[in-house]
Image (cartoon, helix red, strand yellow):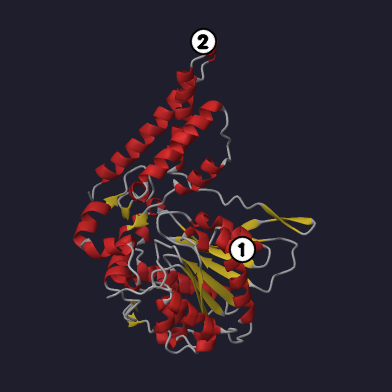
Amino acid sequence: MKYMATYDLMETVRNTNEWLGATARAMASYPALAMWPNPAMEMMRAWGEVTERSFARMVAKPDWGIDTFSEGKRDHLVEIETVLSKPFGDLIHFAIPGRKPRDRRVLLVAPMSGHYATLLRKTVRSLLTDCDVYITDWHNARDIPVSAGKFDVEDYTLYLSEFMRELGPDIHVIAVCQPVPLALAATADLAAQDPDAQPRSLTLIGGPVDPEANPTEVTDFGRTVTMGQLEETMIQQVGFKYPGVGRMVYPGLLQLASFISMNIESHTAAFQNQILAQAKGEASENDKHNTFYDEYLAVMDMTAEFYLSTVERIFKNREIATNSFTVEGRKIDLGKITNVAVKIVEGEEDDISAPGQCLAALDLLTGLDDSKKAAHIEPGAGHYGIFAGRSWRNNIRPLVLDFIDANADGKPVAKGPASVKAAKKAAPRSAA
C-alpha cells in the first residue's frame, strides 16, 4: 500500500462522498419540490446534509473555540499565542490579557494518535480559571514537506524536552494518553542533561508505560502483528494535493476507518438517528451529535516513522517499561528523576490504557522518594472520562490541582505512599 495511488484513492472516496452529500442536499432543497411534499425528499436532503458535513470534517482541523471564559462577574478574552514554532508541532499559550497572572503554570502534552490537540479542548477550558495553560499543538504530517526530515519517538521526546526548557522549571506537566511514556522519558533526559530545567511535577493520565501490565485489545494488536505487516498495510505516501507530497505516513483516514470499525454498530445508529432528526427539523448546528463527530471525524496523518517506532519500541520492545529507552544514542535512565513529583491517574473502566499500564511508571522511578509519588484510580471511568468527562471535572481535576499546589515549592506529596499502595491494590496485573 506504500504508494501515492492508495493515498489518493482514499482521498478520492472521501471527496466523492462529500460531493454526493452536497448534491443530494442541493437537489432535495429545490423550491419547486416543495409544491409536492414528499418524505423521500426530506430524507434525501437530511442524508445529504449529514453526509456532506461528515466527510468535509475529515480534512478540516477543528478550531479551539475558546475565545472567552467567565470568571466571577467578568468575561475574559482568550488569545492563542505561539510560544515556540517547530516543523512538526508548536508550543502554544492560552493568554488572558488583563488578568492577574496565575501561580499554577501548566503544560498539557496532547496525544499524537490520530486526532488533533483540540481533543483536549474541554481539559484546557476547565483549567483556564485556575491555571496559566500551555499545550503542544502537533501538526498534520501531510502538510509538512519532506525537506523537514523525519519525526519519530526520539524526536517527539526531544520536542518535549525543548518545550519544558522554554517554559522554565516552575512548570507543571500533565501528559494525556499516548505521550505519557515519552513525557516520562523527556523528564528523565532533562534530569541527566539539564537538571535545572525539570518541571516541578508530572501528572501522567492513562498512558501505556508498560502495555503488558494489563493487556487490552490495543496492546494485543501491537504484539501479534509484525512490523513488516504494519509497514505494508498501514503506511502510504502523501499525494500531490498536500504540501507533504511524497512523505510516508499513517493516514488519518485509515486510522478513522479503524476507530469506527471497533464500534461500528453504535456509529451506524448515531448517524441514522441524526439523519432522522435532520429530516424532522430537530437537529441543530451545534447539537450533541455534531459537537462530538466534528471532533471525532477530524483526523490527522502521523509520520510513518513515528507510528512504527511507537509500536516497535513502546509496545513490542517495551523500552520504557524495561528502562532501556535511548535518544540520540544515549540511554534514558528513569532512575535519574529524583525531585520531580509524579502522580498517576487511571480509569477503572479504561479499555485503551487499562489500569496498571500507567501505574507501572512508579516502580521505574527508583531514585524518587515515595513521598513524591501519588496515584489515583477513578472508579467507573473510561479512557475519555479521566481527562475530559464528568470524572475529570468532578473528581480528578481537583486532585490534580491539589497535587500541583502541594509541589509548587518542592514540598512532599501529602499521603503519597498510602495513595500509591491503594492504587496498586486496585489495579489488576497481567498474569504474565
The residue under the point 25% across, 42% down is: 5
Q: Dot 1 lies on which element?
A: helix
Q: Which residue is mark 1?
A: 394
Q: Dividing the image into 4 quarters, which one contains the C terminus? A: bottom left
Q: Which residue is mark 2?
A: 36
Pair 2/1: label in front: 1
Is the residue marked by circle 1 packed among few (<14), some (14-19), or many (20+) residues within 10 Å? few
Q: Amino acid at mark 2?
A: Trp
Using residue 340 as the reference point, say whether residue 320 is left or right of it. Answer: left
Give me the disc on residue 269: none
Observer able to see residue 168: yes
Observer able to see residue 196: no
What percent of the width, then of the height, locates residue 411? 61, 87
Is the residue marked by circle 2 packed among few (<14), some (14-19), or many (20+) residues within 10 Å? few
Q: Amino acid at mark 1?
A: Asn
User: Residue 339, relative to residue 77: is it above or below?
Assistant: below
Decide which of 355, 148 is in the foreground and name it. Answer: 355
What percent of the width, then of the height, locates residue 158? 42, 72
User: Residue 324, relative to residue 62: is it above or below?
Assistant: below
The residue under the point 57% across, 63% down is: 392
Q: Which image quarter: residue 406?
A: bottom right
Of the numbered discs 2 and 1, the one sitting upstream in the chain is: 2
What percent of the width, then of the height, locates residue 366? 42, 88
